């Protein structure tokens, strides 16, 4: 296995399974399909690397999600520090006409004024003044600052924005489906997990063995991975120029 790098092909893992279980090459196609199911299963939870893309809004204040998106993790806009400021997810936004290019005009024909702004600004409902400002009523809104809102239409793979949304693009962080070139590539740390999944579906292993290998693979990378640099930073951050008690 000296020729293995960070990535290994699914075909290689299938061959390892066949060798380990003394299976013939006639089982290769079946094992390869089952291995692909393992990749999809792990991509949802542990092995899928989040991708971030900038999406331009359509003229009807919607945005198309990438075709390879199987699960989204974050929707927001880029702030002046290079960070993603997430949008509020408002499931009250309607998906009605979200595929129609005339969505905004159709919504305008159906809008009503709920009068909430007039209620909060009314003098009888102001709790108290402080330096010329007043405190909002309890329940009207919290202190979380967000720069807009949206809703995800999972069925049509669309992100929906209200008519007054002022930005022309958003950043989407998502988990993509396994990508095929000549073959599907698997991170080496999940090698045993894929093999365990194939063994499970061939009734040569158990579901518990598969999940144990997934857990082991997850701990070998990402945020669970421990590095000397990370340990050194923790030690240095704890040693401040201050009196010790």
Image (tube, rainbow, N blue to C red):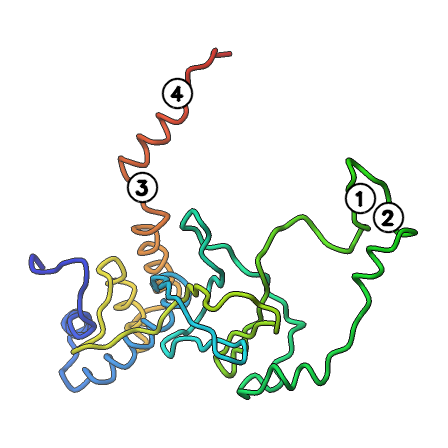
Residue 101 on image: x %, y %: 53, 87
Residue 50 on image: x %, y %: 37, 62
Mark 4, residue position: 239
In front: mark 3 or mark 1? 1
Whether the residues at callouts 1 and 2 have beta carbons within 8 Å, the answer is yes
How far apart marks 3 and 2 lie (CA) works out to 53 Å
**Above or below, 241 relative to 134:** above
Q: Earlier in the sequence, mark 3 or mark 2?
A: 2
Mark 3, residue position: 226
In front: mark 4 or mark 1? 1
Mark 1, residue position: 134
Mark 2, residue position: 126
Q: Earlier in the sequence, mark 3 or mark 1?
A: 1
Q: Earlier in the sequence, mark 1 or mark 2?
A: 2
Residue 63 placement, left or right of 231: right
How far apart marks 4 and 3 lie (CA) works out to 20 Å
């Amino acid at each position: 296995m000296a020729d293995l790098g960070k990535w290994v092909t699914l075909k290689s893992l299938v061959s390892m399974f066949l060798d380990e279980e003394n299976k013939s090459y006639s089982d290769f196609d079946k094992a390869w399909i089952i291995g692909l199911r393992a990749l999809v299963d792990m991509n949802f939870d542990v092995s899928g690397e989040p991708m971030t893309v900038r999406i331009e809004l359509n003229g009807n204040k919607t945005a198309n999600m990438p075709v390879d998106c199987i699960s989204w993790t974050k929707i927001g806009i880029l702030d002046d520090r290079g960070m993603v400021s997430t949008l509020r997810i408002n499931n009250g936004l309607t998906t009605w006409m979200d595929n129609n290019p005339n969505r905004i005009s159709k919504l305008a024909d159906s809008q009503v004024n709920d009068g909430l702004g007039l209620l909060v600004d009314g003098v009888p409902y102001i709790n108290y003044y402080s330096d010329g400002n007043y405190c909002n009523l309890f329940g009207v809104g919290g202190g979380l600052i967000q720069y807009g809102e949206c809703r995800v239409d999972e069925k049509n793979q669309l992100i929906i924005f209200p008519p007054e949304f002022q930005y022309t693009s958003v950043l989407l962080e998502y988990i993509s489906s396994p990508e095929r070139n000549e073959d599907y590539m698997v991170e080496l740390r999940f090698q045993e997990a894929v093999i365990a999944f194939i063994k499970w579906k061939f009734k040569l292993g158990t579901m518990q063995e598969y999940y144990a290998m997934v857990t082991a693979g997850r701990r070998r990378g990402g945020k669970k991975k421990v590095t000397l640099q990370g340990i050194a930073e923790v030690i240095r951050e704890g040693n401040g120029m201050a009196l010790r008690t």
